[in-house]
Image (spheres, rainbow, N blue to C red):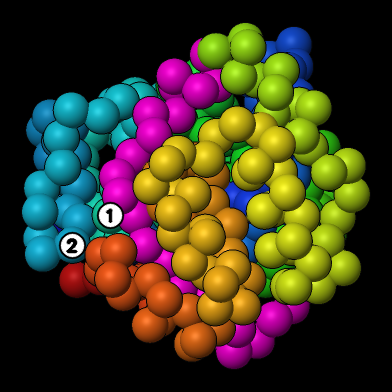
Amino acid sequence: MDGAAIARSPGHISGYFRCIPGATPRETGSAGAGIVIEEGVVARAIPSPSPAVRMLFPENRLAGGGPPLIEHAMERLGVSAEVTTKSTLPAGAGFGLSAAALLASISALSALFDLRLADPEIASLAHEIEVIHRTGLGDVAACLGGGIECRKGPGVRAEIERIPSPGGIIHAISFGPIPTPQVLGDPARMEMIDRAFPGRCPRNLGDLFSLSRSFAEKSGLVTPRVGEVLGACDRAGVSSSMTMLGEGVFALGDEAVPVLSPFGKVFRLRIAGRGFSRGEVVR
């Protein structure tokens, strides 16, 4: 087989969530709300006698040592390829990049090998792999569309309420990862998260920030560095909250830039208008 296939997926910032266990990985997931962002992952797949994965992040830094998510996907699909994923955002920072990488990669593999997977099949496999490896619970479902999203149940078939927000801009900084498996595998932390859950969908973007901030503080997930940034945003009158799950902050509007800049590199993020794309074969 010649050629290559390319697909992309938006990323996702989770503002608040509640884990919902199920009888199977596909029935396990989370309810919650967040923002789907244009900046996500582009995946490129080419045929290879043995499976290989390269994950490129800012400055073309090659990331390694993470869970073998895409390798798992290729095993399940019965295909072998060299898959390269690329993102302009840092890994493990609460931008939903593991879900985006899976969606984009599976979509590209489906096109490359003419598997003709429907979008729900791609999403179901990606979600199942995320749950198995404890790298996420709701990002895949969120990335099926754009805007501000509110997931009312677990898995990719649950009802999702979306609020379009064309042209919406947020900014974010990251101090590094908070290992998702450590949080999702800690019963005490999960109990605090469950108690902090707001229990309703946001009415608009401003309401999302308000609900997310309350959740972040009540859940006990705010670190000292994140707390310092949130305090600076409060003093400047900028709506902000903690990225879930990453040691970072996302804030509303261009007014956030001078507030966030003293703390590190600021990422400008656009609210996405659509979800992941179908893979396309290129020659």
Real-space Cα distance between discs 2 and 1? 6 Å
- Comparing 243 with 91, the one in front is 243
Question: Dot 2 corresponds to which residue?
Answer: 58
Q: Residue at x 55, y 12 (%)?
A: 186
Considering the numbered disc 2 on the image, is that residue within a helix, a strand or a loop? helix
Q: Residue at x 60, y 19 (%)?
A: 189
* View extreme (front): residue: 235
Give neighbour class at mark 1: few <14, some 14-19, many 20+ (Cα, 10 Å): many
Q: Is label 2 in contact with label 1 (beta carbons under 8 Å)?
A: yes
Give neighbour class at mark 2: few <14, some 14-19, many 20+ (Cα, 10 Å): few
Label 1 is placed on what type of residue?
Pro
Report the span colored magenta: 163-185
Residue 90, which numbered label? 1
Asked whether 165 falls inside the magenta stretch, the response is: yes
**Residue 94 in view, yes or no:** no
Asked whether 176 falls inside the magenta stretch, the response is: yes
